Every structure is written in structure tokens, then in C-alpha cells.
Image (tube, helix red, strand yellow):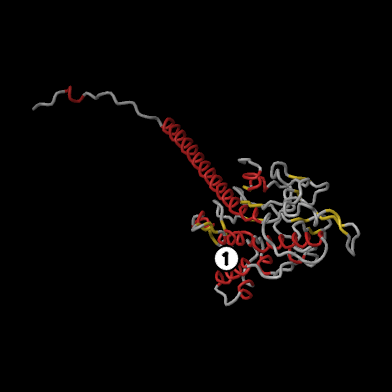
Amino acid sequence: MPITARQFVRRPLRPAFTLVELLVVMGVLAMLSSLVLVGLASAAEQARVNRTRSQVQKIHELLMTRWEEYRYRRIEASKSGDVRTRLTSRVDKIREMMRIEMPDRKTDVSNAPVSLSTVPALQLRYQRSITNAKGAANYAAAVSGWSDANESSECLYMILASIQSGETNGLDFFKPSEIGDTDGDGVPEILDAWGKPILFLRWPYGYPNIENVSPAQRRNGLSQIMDNTTPDPFDPLGVRGGRTTTSTSPRVEYAHFPLHPLIFSAGPDELYNIRTGINDSSGNAIAYSSTTPPNNPYMEDTTAGYSKRIGAILDKSGDELDNITNHVLVIAGNSQ
């Protein structure tokens, strides 16, 4: 069949994207992708915040059940001395029970009672727990390898493990991913959603004062319950409060107001900025069992020329402002 000239006529080409148009489209897609990724990251971070809030709330509920029991706890009564002496003995014994049964440091678990005549069963249980966790022959061998880096979180784990309601154990409320050993000492810790230990202070005397600032400053909004006009619920008559006479100082004043336990996560920045312990003039950790009066919740160290208190904010950096705490989240009724 002969080929005609008409068959060689070119049809008009379809218009195509120019290089500039392609680059613009790619740029728009990249921008949209980055916005989606930022949104996903923000959602994931908020999910971690919400999860940690839930953890702190649950820990608070479990601990406060035990904390409230000390208001009415039956304590062996002193049969000697006047009424004030007997009341003072009761306060000392309640504080010692709190120190031993709600420990927040190694010395609370290790040091023997000074006010009680017998060792509480929970102290022996905690010591067995450490011994088993370390795989040691006895507690003396186990405690030497127990790191103090995250001791308050490890004590918190033991407290929760000791709380039982029917067939439900305190640890049943936490997922396996919320329990770990970040310092590698073999003793479990309670972890927040960022994998950092959730810390616990039984008597946060310094919170929320800022250290080394004169006059003392406070972080407004961090705690609305540290009210020094309200009496200590475990010493309502103030037998261990007010002023007393000692051989070294004729006018020594002991603090006398409620100290609610502080449960706190470092939050998104993973920085606590909260003092969890104080040392004596020799650099050794101060133990509650050796304070005056014994198991004094309001102990402090002034050897540095300024007051150092457990629970105080270490500096003015503001690193603690994103902490997730029960003081703000639960007690003060604030959703942070």
C-alpha cells in the first residue's frame, strides 16, 4: 500500500512540566511532609506526657493510701513521763514508721530503728527484696552493690510491690515497659514515658524553694500545698514543732507543717533540677535516722553558707518547670 504524505504530518505535542514547575511541586510536597512529621512528633510527645501523668496519678493514689494510714496507726505507747513526753514519743515512732515503710533512700532501708523497739516487717521485706535482686547471700553483701544514683525510684518500686489490695498488687498497674534498671545495679525502677526513673521524696522539705538565693525564692505554681500555717497532721499539737532548748543553741526552731510526698518525672527535657539528698560537713550523705530529733522530716544542711533542703530547686535555670509532679497534677488540682 503506497504511503501518502498525510501519514507524515506531526500531531501537536502535549504540554509538559518545566523544570521550575517540578521543583516547585517537590518543594511543596517536602513542606507538607515536614508539617506532617512535626505534627506526628508533637502528638507522640503529648502522648508521652499524658502517659506519664497517668503514672504519677496512679502512684500518688497508691502512696497516699498508706500515707493516710499513719494518722490513725496504732503505735506502741510510752508508759513513762508526762503527757508531752508520751506524745513526743508517739510522733517519733510514727515518723520512724514512715521512714522505714516509705523509704526514699538506701539508708532508710538499711538503718535500724532508733525509736521503735522492734524492726518493722516491711524493712525486713525490703532488705530481702534487695538481696534477691542482687543475687547476694545476704543484705550486707547486696547493699554494697546497690547504687544510690536512682535509689528513690528503686525504693518507690519496692513500696508499690508491698501494697496489696485483695489480689491486686501495686505493680499490677504498670506495664513491663514502665519498669527497668537504668543504672544497671540490678534493682528495678519505675520509668516514665521517656524511659527516665520517676523519683519519689517522702519529705520534700525544700520544695519549691530555690537554693542559694537570698531572700529565698519559690517557683510559683509548682506547689500550692506547702503551707507553713497548717500543722503537721502527724503532730497536730506541735510537740515536735515550735521552739526547744538544747545544749548548743538555746533557741532552736523546728518546722511544723505538712510535707506531702513528692512524686516527679523529669518531663520532656529529662532534667529534674530537684535536690534529692544532702551531705554533712564531711561529704557523707545525711541519714534521717541520725538527725535531731530522730527521723526529722525538716532536716537541712547549712554548711555551705546557705540552706540546703531535700526537695529544693537546685538553680534558676527553670529545668524543673516541665516536671510532671503529683503536687501540681493531683494535690493542687491542676492539669499542668
Residue 118 or residue 45, whichever sits in front: 118
Residue under the image location 78 percent in, 62 percent down: 86
The quarter in which the C terminus is drawn is top right
Quarter of the figure with residue 296:
bottom right
For this orientation, the residue located farthest to the bottom is: 137
Near mark 1 (Cα within 10 A), the count class, few <14, some 14-19 or many ≥20, is: many
Residue 250 visible from this viewpoint: yes
Residue 13 position in % (x across, y down): 29, 26
- Does residue 314 show up? no
- Report the amino acid beneath label 1: Val
The answer to whether 214 is drawn above or below residue 78 in the figure is above
Q: Is residue 123 left or right of residue 85?
A: left
Q: Is residue 55 left or right of residue 256?
A: left
Task: Give the labeled residue for mark 1.
Answer: 187
- Residue 319, given in percent of the width and then of the height, sits at 67, 48
Q: Quadrant of the N terminus?
A: top left
| Position of residue 160 in the picture relative to residue 32 (left or right) | right
